[in-house]
């Protein structure tokens, strides 16, 4: 078994606050890679490569290296990424 380190990459992300729909829509315009919708309970449902995944208020929405979008819980995001 080998050990591996994650390659350093730069990503783009937006934190879903529940009040920043305009920012989300600018960041993630409707496209094949990023179709999404808002729920009445203030969640963002994002069509990802793995299927529909929900972003709760406080989650980050990340644009992946292939242009795909997916949510990430804040604790994982803050452990994995640092602001440039």
Image (tube, rainbow, N blue to C red):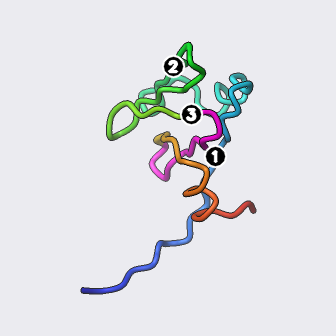
Q: Find numbered disc 1 in the image and state the secondary structure of the residue it sits on.
A: strand
User: Is 84 on the left or on the right of 55, as rendered?
Assistant: right
Please name the residue that numbered disc 2 is placed on.
37
Residue 23 place in picture, x, y as percent = 72, 29
Categorize mark 3 by other alpha carbons within 10 Å: few (<14), some (14-19), many (20+).
many
Q: Is residue 58 magenta?
A: yes
Which of pointers 3 and 1 indicates the residue nearer the eye? 3
**6 is higher (above) or lower (below) than 20:** below
**Residue at position x 49%, y 24% in the image:** 36
Earlier-in-chain disc, 3 versus 2: 2
Please tell me in which quadrant of the rendered image residue 82 appears: bottom right
Categorize mark 1 by other alpha carbons within 10 Å: few (<14), some (14-19), many (20+).
some
Residue 11 place in picture, x, y as percent = 60, 54
Categorize mark 2 by other alpha carbons within 10 Å: few (<14), some (14-19), many (20+).
few
What segment is highlighted magenta in the picture?
Answer: 56-67
User: How many angstroms separate mark 3 from mark 1 (CA)?
Assistant: 15 Å
User: Is 28 on the left or on the right of 69, as rendered?
Assistant: right
Number of the label disc, if any, that sits on residue 56? 3
Residue 74 place in picture, x, y as percent = 61, 50
Please name the residue that numbered disc 1 is placed on.
13
């Amino acid at each position: 078994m080998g050990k591996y380190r994650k390659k350093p990459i730069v990503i783009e992300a937006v934190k879903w606050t529940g009040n920043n729909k305009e920012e989300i829509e600018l960041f993630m315009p409707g496209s094949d890679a990023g179709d999404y919708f808002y729920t009445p309970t203030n969640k963002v449902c994002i069509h990802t490569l793995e299927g529909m995944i929900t972003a709760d208020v406080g989650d980050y929405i990340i644009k992946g290296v292939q242009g795909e979008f997916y949510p990430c819980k804040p604790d994982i995001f803050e452990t994995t990424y640092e602001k440039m």
